[in-house]
Image (cartoon, rainbow, N blue to C red):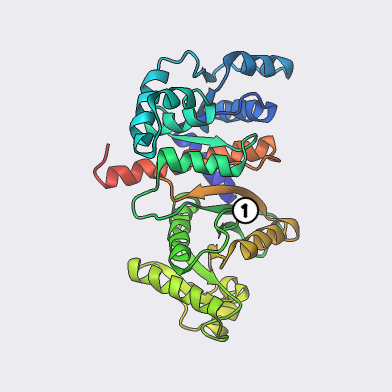
């Protein structure tokens, strides 16, 4: 079974409430209907009710079964404004500013998630990434133990010509430009968690470099090594290779020759790139030349699930991100239960 199909099946098994806040975009409406009809999520469309229904009518989209929430008349608006004011008062936000901000669908959708009225949110078909990420950080905050929000791509290698089969996590390919060793370690641990949640198998992390096990000496290599050693200190059970070239990360025969002591053994399912430049090039090579399906960029490190979309996204892209957000919400619920939370 394809890795993506496993994610879709998991989403259908226990769908979650996913808030979408760009319902005036036809792609969002069609993806919302697909998600609801396929049972991967209980979709909430947040925004101007008249504008959303007008867009739906124009494009022949039947919104039956979709919950429409208009901040202008929602019974939740007052309480969400109060929650936003309490959250941002120390940053100088007045009550009046909170009451105005909460009427913005992106803000409202994130507050739904924060206050437990939704389990995750998806935006970015209209809003720029910087706005989506900033709002999520301000309202949802960071997950325990995380010091930054980063991104990853879920790369699907499921075509007959792929020598590697299944899903992989590529990180960070969309957000943190030049991570230092501490930030790179955080990215690696968050990506390992993303793999556990979405791939349904143990994480095997490769810290990519132009060096394998000290074959080259350079400050960029040392950063990767330091980051890997920080991860090892915090998660000694995690299979992780320090500085490793891509071939040794994903080809068992090369790993055996270049890195015989490896715990990953050329079978990495998490690739950590040393910086955004390498990550962006890497995922696009895998997608455009290697024929991998790239889902993302997805966000990691937040206290609750929220994901970004490319403004050039297709209906299928949005549908897949909704499914991933549902599975992330399932994993977040499991972690809270394990920690004794509600």
Residue at left offset 56%, top offset 64%? 178
Question: In the figure, 220 relative to 201: above or below?
Answer: below
Question: In the figure, 77 relative to 245: above or below?
Answer: above
Q: Is residue 242 visible?
A: no
**Which sits in the foreground, 236 or 133?**
133
Residue 81 is situated, as x and y percent measured from the top left of the image, at 40, 24
**Which sits in the foreground, 229 or 257?**
229
In what element is the residue under mark 1?
strand
Residue 216 is situated, as x and y percent measured from the top left of the image, at 57, 85
Residue annotated with mark 1: 156
Quadrant of the drawing holding the C terminus? top left
Residue at left offset 57%, top offset 65%? 273
Residue 250 location, quadrant: bottom right
Residue 51 is situated, as x and y percent measured from the top left of the image, at 64, 16
| Residue 301 in the figure: left or right of residue 285 | left
**Which sits in the foreground, 316 or 284?**
284
| Residue 338 in the figure: left or right of residue 138 | left
Question: In the figure, 34 relative to 341: above or below?
Answer: above
Residue 145 location, quadrant: bottom left
Q: Report crowding for label 1: few under 14, some 14 to 19, many 20 or more residues within 10 A (C-alpha).
A: many
């Amino acid at each position: 079974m394809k890795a993506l199909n496993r994610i879709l099946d998991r989403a259908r098994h226990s769908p979650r409430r996913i808030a979408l806040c760009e319902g005036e975009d036809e792609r969002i409406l069609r993806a919302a209907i697909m998600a609801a009809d396929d049972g991967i999520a209980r979709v909430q469309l947040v925004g101007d009710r008249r504008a959303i229904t007008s867009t739906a009518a124009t494009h022949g989209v039947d919104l039956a079964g979709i919950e429409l929430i208009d901040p202008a008349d929602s019974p939740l608006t007052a309480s969400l404004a109060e929650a936003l004011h309490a959250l941002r008062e120390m940053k100088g936000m007045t009550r009046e500013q909170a009451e105005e901000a909460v009427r913005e669908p992106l803000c409202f959708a994130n507050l739904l998630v924060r206050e437990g009225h939704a389990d995750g949110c998806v935006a970015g078909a209209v809003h720029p990434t910087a706005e989506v990420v900033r709002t999520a950080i301000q309202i949802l905050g960071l997950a325990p133990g995380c010091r930054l929000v980063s991104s990853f791509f879920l790369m699907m290698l499921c075509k007959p010509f792929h020598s590697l089969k299944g899903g992989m996590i590529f990180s960070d390919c969309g957000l943190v430009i030049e991570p230092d060793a501490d930030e790179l370690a955080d990215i690696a641990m968050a990506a390992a968690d993303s793999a556990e949640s979405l791939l349904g198998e143990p994480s095997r992390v490769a810290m990519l470099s132009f060096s394998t096990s000290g074959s080259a000496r350079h400050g960029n290599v040392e950063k990767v090594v330091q980051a890997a050693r920080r991860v090892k200190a915090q998660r000694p059970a995690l299979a992780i290779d320090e500085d490793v070239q891509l071939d040794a990360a994903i080809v068992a025969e090369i790993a055996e020759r270049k890195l015989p002591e490896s715990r990953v053994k050329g079978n990495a399912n998490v690739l950590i790139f040393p910086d955004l430049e390498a990550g962006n090039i890497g995922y696009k090579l895998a997608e455009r030349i290697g024929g991998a399906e790239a889902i993302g960029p997805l966000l990691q490190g937040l206290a609750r699930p929220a994901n970004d979309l490319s403004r050039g996204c297709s209906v299928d892209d949005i549908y897949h991100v909704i499914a991933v957000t549902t599975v992330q919400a399932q994993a977040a619920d499991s972690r809270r239960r394990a920690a004794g939370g509600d």
